Amino acid sequence: MHRVAYLILICTIISCGCITQSPSPAEETGIRLLTPTAGFPIFDGQGHYAGIIGQETPDITINYSMGLVTLAPGNVLPPHRLLGTTEMICILQGAAEIRCDNVTISAREGEVVVLPADVLRSTKATGNTSLKFIDVIQPPFAPEIEISDADLSECTVQTDGAPIIISDPRGGIEWDIGSDMMIYSLANPALMPEAHFPIDYSLAYAELLPGGGADTNRFTGASEVIYVIEGEIEVFTPAGTVITVPAGSAVYIAPEQKKGYRNAGETVAAILSFVDPAWTPELVDWAV
């Protein structure tokens, strides 16, 4: 009983401002490590979703939601629509058969598929290994935008959309922005208007050799989320904060935040970079 009363007293003192809570370095610098949640089953257990950005991160203001989807071999996410919402599928493992209205495509590890809003879609895990992909939904996912099962027959939306397939992560626009680090723009509506990407953010793929990285910089008016596919990177700031991001995790970097990247490991690090709004050379400030 005394312990409960003591805790109540401490909380009251903190809320009155008599004691201030010291923020963590990540909170002070606008950098936050994002570890996928334990997640939950989706579509009657056909798949599993582990959130990275969305309802799990209400304090992060960003124009999309992101999570990891896993399907066992042979499992399928049945036909459904996402009203007014685009979907990007970045395949990390396995192979998939993806339907987009009247088109069905095959995609494998390393490939990216962008699906327009409203299209009738489904995803099946093909092959002998589980399918695992990053799923990016813009605007952020909300239950009311998903139409499936019996509700599909009552949906009056008519579409005939085509998927956009990015088959080579090294086939985009190439940028040499640092020491032993190459980055490739894969999906960027600002730099690739001819591709008609139905998104406002951009996606890039980068590889950092051991010891490689990029000098301190900041993005003016744009946030960045980095997902580490392989290896491990460090995100550092001029103030001395260092955030280690292992494979399978991500890091959020707020707009205007000064930061740099480096691969402090002994193997090549591979990352995906999501910038919102879409990255352009003009938004990068290197004079920091």
Image: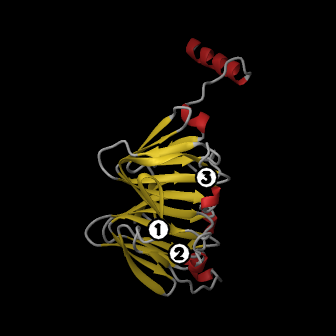
Going by the numbered disc 3, the residue's amino acid type is: Ser
Looking at the image, residue 80 sits to the left or right of residue 208; the answer is: right
What x and y, as percent, mark residue 148? 54, 73
Q: Is residue 122 above or below residue 66?
A: below
Real-space Cα distance between discs 1 and 3? 20 Å
Q: Residue at x 57, y 76 (%)?
A: 116
What residue type is disc 2 on?
Leu
- How far apart marks 2 and 3 lie (CA) works out to 23 Å
Specify which label sits upstream in the sequence, 2 or 3.
2
Examine the image and state in which quarter residue 133 appears: bottom left
Assign a secondary structure to mark 3: strand
Q: Which mark is residue 28?
A: none
Sequence-wise, the earlier of marks 1 and 3 is 1
Labels 1 & 3 near each other (Cβ < 8 A): no
Q: Nearer the viewer, residue 11 or 256?
A: 256
- Total numbered badges shown on the rendered structure: 3
User: Up-down: is 61 above or below 169?
Assistant: above
Among numbered discs 1 and 2, the one appearing first in the sequence? 1
